[in-house]
Image (cartoon, rainbow, N blue to C red):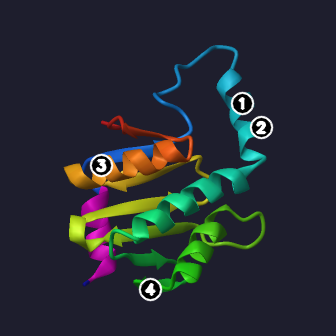
Amino acid sequence: MDCEAKAEELLGRERYLIDIFPERVPEKADGRYFGAERILREDMADFGRKIRNIVLKLYCYCDMTAVSEEGTEINPPAELLADMVGRCYSTGEGTGYLHIILPEHDSMLVINRGDLYAELCAPDERLKKLVADLARAEGLFFVRAETQD
């Protein structure tokens, strides 16, 4: 499988967010979102732990191809997968992104360093339900991403 081509294809399809917010935050003139976001970013390790837990639990159900700037791993050992996710949220040197392709679902989980959300691209109905349940168990929300047209 050409992982880069597959990732590009999946990025162009319907997306869902695993997010700290249940819906889009409205713009306020006083900029309160940015102040709250700054404080929430001070503990990225907590959010990263939640995403790591979701990924590891999802791994029990699905094959995964993990793609980062450091290389590609097909069904990596759980410890390596956890480490790959953790490096996206570490305060030191870490990877900038992690694309986790889920071939059985023709879908992909996207994790970007510094984001307080992860994206699930092109999920089928079974995967949506599973990820929604896993997100809820970690105190996160699973919501359809708004299009940026």
Asked if the residues shown at circle 1 and circle 3 are in contact, with their CB atoms under 8 angstroms apart, the answer is no
Q: Residues within 10 Å of mark 1 (few under 14, many from 20)?
A: few
Camera-side residue of 85 and 8:
85
Q: In the rendered view, would you say 114 is above or below 3? A: above
Which residue lies under the disc numbered 3? 128
Q: In the rendered view, would you say 58 is above or below 16? A: below
Nearer the observer: mark 1 or 3; the answer is: 3
Which residue lies under the disc numbered 2? 39
Residue 73 numbered mark, or none: 4
- The mark that comes first in sequence, 1 or 4, is 1
Q: Amino acid at mark 2?
A: Ile
- The mark that comes first in sequence, 3 or 4, is 4
Quadrant where the image shows the N terminus: bottom left
Residue in the image at 36% along x and 45% along y? 16
Q: Is residue 6 visible?
A: yes
Relative placement, left or right, of 86 versus 18 is right
Cα distance in 3D space between marks 3 and 4 = 24 Å
Task: Give the quarter of the image for residue 149.
Answer: top left
Q: Is residue 62 found inside the magenta-colored segment of the image?
A: no
